[in-house]
Amino acid sequence: MELQLEAVTKNYKNKQVLKGISLTMSAGVYGLLGPNGAGKTTLIRILADVLRPTNGCVLYDGKDIHSVGDEYRAKIGYLPQDVSFYGNFTGRDYLEYSAALKGMEKACAKKRIEELARSVGLWDDLKRKCAAYSGGMQRRLGIAQALLDDPEILILDEPTSGLDPYERIKFRNIISAYAKERLVLLSTHIVSDVEHIAAQIMMMENGSIQHIHTGGEYVQIMEGRVWLAEMPAEQLVEYQNQAVLSNVRAKNDCMEVRIIADTKPVPGAVQAIPTLEDAYLYLFNYLPGKAGR
């Protein structure tokens, strides 16, 4: 199985949202990281065949997905960034309706709905109206919908939006268990969503894929570029306007600051073990006041 983008661009009026993206994905979990406005949702919608590119094409096993049509769409589980629910639908109604749209047999659909409802923690809430669900519950219902027919390709746009920390961990466990011999693309601006489950992580900014590495490779890039320093709160107020900081915490009578810099940033700073989040901030040059942040 191979999903390939060839010079994909997308224009909205006079604005180019995607700028000639070319990449190849096969089985495994791929993370798509980038700030809001980077073009992630547009790219996701093109891969889900919801939106057509202005130029370029998407190939599934060498065939243009538009020529494959329904055959390609049947292989996809898709969770959009915003999920709409019919007001009178219960959680079970929604999943049964989704299963019918996917052409699933009733007996198979019933078994799968029960299995997934338990997995995402909605078993006791299937009789409740979707409109009464919390934002996190609606997100979990959307995840169950995307997994219903055991798709070969799973495309998730901001899937953990509205989920609490425990639900995020549970979601990552579900995806890790599901991903074997399948292609999973998870788009997010939350680094922890992909840090431990994605084999390849793509960093996107301004309509382009800027970097593609494993999590370990990103961490290697940051060796010698992450520092810990202590400074008074008064000094931090001024310093934070001219440096890339990945964390700040109170420590005794001063502040412990995690600084991202190519060289020792302040006297007394010591090197720290880097993380993927450090790489994200460094590679996108998250300086205070930078346009688009």
Image: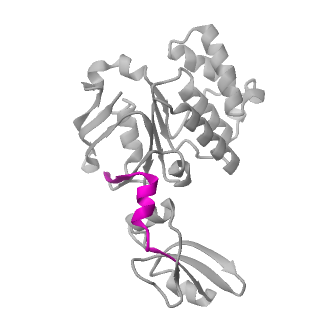
Residue 67 vertical position relative to residue 210 in the rendered view, above or below: above
Residue 155 vertical position relative to residue 9 in the rendered view, above or below: above
Residue 191 vertical position relative to residue 263 in the rendered view, above or below: above
Q: Is residue 269 left or right of residue 22?
A: right
Q: Could you tell me if residue 264 is visible in this image?
A: yes
Residue at 39% of width from left, 53% of height from top? 203
Residue at 55% of width from left, 41% of height from top? 159
Q: Is residue 180 left or right of residue 284?
A: right
What percent of the width, then of the height, locates residue 17? 31, 48
Depth check, front residue: 208 or 211: 211
Whether residue 212 appears in magenta in the rendering, the answer is yes
Q: Could you tell me if residue 135 is visible in this image?
A: no
What percent of the width, then of the height, locates residue 161? 58, 46
Q: Is residue 17 left or right of residue 201?
A: left
Where is the N terminus found, in terms of image quarters?
top left
Depth check, front residue: 31 or 74: 31
Depth check, front residue: 89 or 141: 141
**Occupied quadrant, residue 76:** top left
What percent of the width, then of the height, locates residue 112? 63, 19
Q: Which residues are magenta?
A: 208-227
Q: Is residue 46 left or right of residue 56?
A: right
Whether residue 145 appears in magenta in the rendering, the answer is no
Residue 52 vertical position relative to residue 192 in the rendered view, above or below: above
| Picture colour scheme | one colour
**Occupied quadrant, residue 228:** bottom right
Residue at 59% of width from left, 42% of height from top? 172
Where is the C terminus found, in terms of image quarters?
bottom left
For this orientation, the residue located farthest to the right is 124
What percent of the width, then of the height, locates residue 223? 44, 69
